[in-house]
C-alpha cells in the first residue's frame, strides 16, 4: 500500500523535497503552504527557485498528479515540516522565531492519528523536538502512538536536488522506534549514509555545522581587514598560507549571508549565552565586515569626488549572498547596496537577480560605458569572462569578494 506523505512548507527545502519524493512510486505526496500566491504560482507550473532541473521535475509531478498542492494539511502517514525559522530581536538579543514550526505542529495535530510519523527538518534550538513531542502527548497520545524525529537539511542552494539524494543525513529520533522507522524512510531515497542518534544530538549537529563555518569565515574576514591595514593583498596572503599542508583559510567576502550560516549560530548563543564566546564574537566580526565594506566604498567615492570635483556614477556588481546565485536571503551585498543606494547615482549588475524595488538594473556592457567606479560585491563567473575581466581591470574595479 502506498504511503501518504505531507510536506509542510514549499520553499527552498520543502518544494525540492516534495518533488523528489513524488518520484517514488510507493508514495503519494501532498504539499501544503500558507502562501496562496506560492500555491497559485506552482499550480500554474511556475517556480521562482533557481534550481537545476527543479522546474521540469515539479511541472511533471504536478501535471501527472503525483504531487498534490493544498493549503490545508491533509491526513497522512508521514508529515515533514520544512518551514522557515528566522530570528527576531528581543531585548537586544537575537531569538529563534519558531512560530511557523509551532503553527505547522498545531495544524498537524488536527489530522494526526495513532501510528503517524512527524519529521522536523527546519533548523531549531536544541530541545525543540522534545518540547514538540511533549505537546503531542498532551494532546492525548501515548508515548509510542506517534513517531517523531529531527532530520536537518544540509544542502547547498543551486544544487539541492543532487544533495538531497547524495549527502549524508542525520536522523535524531525521539525514541528508538522513531529512530529506526525514520532512518529507513530516508534510506528509500538517500544514496549516501543515514546516521541515527537522539533528537538533541541531531539538533546540535545542524547548529554546530553552520557555526563552524561562521567561525572560520570570521577569521578570514578579520584577516582581510588586517591585511588591508598593512597594505597586503589578502588573496595573495591566503593563497600562500594555504600552501601549508595543515592550513585551509577560507575566502573572505563582504560579510556572511544565506539562510543558515548567519542565522543558526544565534540559536546556540540564545541557549548558551555565557559559554558561547567564540561563536558570539564570530557573528560580530562577520556583521562588522559588512559595515567595514560600506565605509570603504564611501571612502573610495569621496576620494574620487575630491580628485575630480564631481560625484561619480557607480556600479555594484553582484547582490546575492554567494557567487553564481540570485538568492538574496541575509545577503550582505544587498544590505550594502540598500544602505548606499539613496546617497549616490547607482547602477546594479547581476544576471541572477531580475528586480528589486528602487534599484536600476543594467547589463555589464552598459555599466562599463556609464560608471566611473565599480564595486564587485559578489564575483559571479559572468564577471570573470576574459573580455569583462580585462575591462574591469582597466576601470580599476574594487573587488570585495
Image (tube, rainbow, N blue to C red):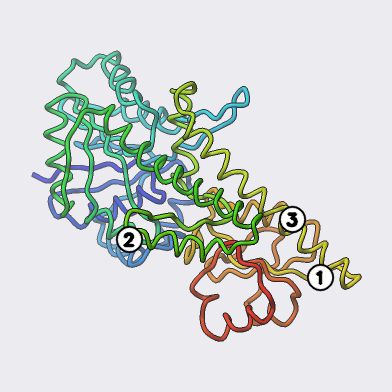
Instruction: Determine which residue is flagged by label 3.
Output: 340
Lower position in the chain sequence, tag 2 or tag 3? 2
Residue drawn at point x = 13 percent, y = 49 percent: 188
Q: Position of residue 179 (x, y in %)?
A: 16, 32
State which quarter of the image contains the C terminus.
Answer: bottom right
Question: Cα distance, mark 1 to mark 3?
Answer: 13 Å
Q: Residues within 10 Å of mark 1 (few under 14, many from 20)?
A: some
Instruction: Determine which residue is flagged by label 2.
Output: 58
Residue drawn at point x = 14 percent, y = 55 percent: 25
Q: Which of the 4 image quadrants contains residue 172?
A: top left
Residue 349, compared with residue 343, is above or below; it is below
Q: Position of residue 50 (x, y in %)?
A: 43, 63
User: Please, what secondary structure does the residue beneath circle 1 have?
Assistant: loop
Q: Position of residue 8 (x, y in %)?
A: 35, 41
Q: Residues within 10 Å of mark 2 (few under 14, many from 20)?
A: many
Residue drawn at point x = 18 percent, y = 51 percent: 190
User: Please, what secondary structure does the residue beneath circle 3 have?
Assistant: helix
Question: Looking at the image, which residue sits at the far bottom?
Answer: 387
Q: Position of residue 117 (x, y in %)?
A: 20, 32
Lower position in the chain sequence, tag 1 or tag 3? 1
Question: Cα distance, mark 2 to mark 3?
Answer: 39 Å
Lower position in the chain sequence, tag 2 or tag 1? 2
State which quarter of the image contains the N terminus.
Answer: top left
Amino acid at each position: 500500500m502506498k504511503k501518504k506523505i505531507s510536506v509542510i512548507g514549499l520553499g527552498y527545502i520543502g518544494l525540492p523535497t516534495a518533488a523528489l519524493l513524488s518520484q517514488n512510486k510507493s508514495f503519494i505526496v501532498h504539499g501544503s503552504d500558507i502562501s496562496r500566491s506560492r500555491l497559485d504560482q506552482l499550480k500554474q507550473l511556475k517556480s521562482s527557485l533557481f534550481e537545476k532541473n527543479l522546474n521540469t521535475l515539479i511541472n511533471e509531478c504536478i501535471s501527472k498528479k503525483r504531487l498534490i498542492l493544498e493549503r490545508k494539511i491533509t491526513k497522512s502517514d508521514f508529515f515533514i515540516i520544512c518551514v522557515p525559522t528566522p530570528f527576531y530581536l528581543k531585548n537586544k538579543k537575537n531569538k529563534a522565531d519558531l512560530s511557523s514550526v509551532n503553527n505547522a505542529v498545531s495544524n498537524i495535530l488536527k489530522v494526526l492519528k495513532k501510528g503517524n510519523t512527524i519529521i522536523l527538518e527546519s533548523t531549531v534550538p536544541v530541545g525543540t523536538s522534545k518540547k514538540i513531542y511533549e505537546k503531542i502527548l498532551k494532546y492525548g497520545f501515548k508515548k509510542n502512538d506517534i513517531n517523531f524525529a529531527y532530520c536537518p537539511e544540509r544542502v547547498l542552494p543551486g544544487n539541492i536536488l543532487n544533495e538531497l539524494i547524495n549527502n549524508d543525513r542525520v536522523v535524531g529520533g525521539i525514541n528508538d522506534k522513531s529512530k529506526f522507522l525514520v532512518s529507513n524512510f530516508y534510506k528509500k531515497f538517500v544514496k549516501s549514509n543515514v546516521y541515527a542518534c537522539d533528537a538533541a544530538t541531531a539538533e546540535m549537529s545542524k547548529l554546530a555545522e553552520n557555526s563552524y563555518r561562521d567561525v572560520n569565515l570570521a577569521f578570514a574576514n578579520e584577516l582581510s581587514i588586517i591585511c588591508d591595514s598593512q597594505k597586503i593583498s589578502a588573496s595573495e596572503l591566503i593563497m600562500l598560507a594555504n600552501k601549508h599542508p595543515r592550513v585551509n583559510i577560507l575566502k573572505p567576502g563582504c560579510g556572511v549571508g544565506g539562510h543558515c550560516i548567519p542565522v543558526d549560530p544565534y540559536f546556540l548563543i540564545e541557549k548558551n549565552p555565557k559559554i558561547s564566546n567564540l561563536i558570539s564574537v564570530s557573528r560580530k566580526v562577520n556583521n562588522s565586515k559588512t559595515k567595514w565594506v560600506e565605509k570603504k566604498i564611501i571612502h573610495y567615492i569621496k576620494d574620487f569626488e575630491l580628485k575630480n570635483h564631481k560625484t561619480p556614477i557607480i556600479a555594484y556588481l553582484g547582490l546575492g549572498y554567494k557567487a553564481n546565485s540570485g538568492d538574496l536571503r541575509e545577503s550582505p551585498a544587498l544590505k550594502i547596496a540598500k544602505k548606499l543606494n539613496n546617497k549616490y547615482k547607482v547602477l546594479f549588475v547581476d544576471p541572477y537577480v531580475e528586480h528589486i524595488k528602487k534599484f536600476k538594473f543594467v547589463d555589464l556592457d552598459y555599466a562599463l560605458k556609464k560608471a566611473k567606479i565599480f564595486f564587485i560585491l559578489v564575483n559571479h563567473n559572468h564577471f570573470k569572462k576574459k573580455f569583462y575581466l580585462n575591462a574591469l581591470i582597466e576601470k580599476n574595479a574594487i573587488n570585495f569578494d
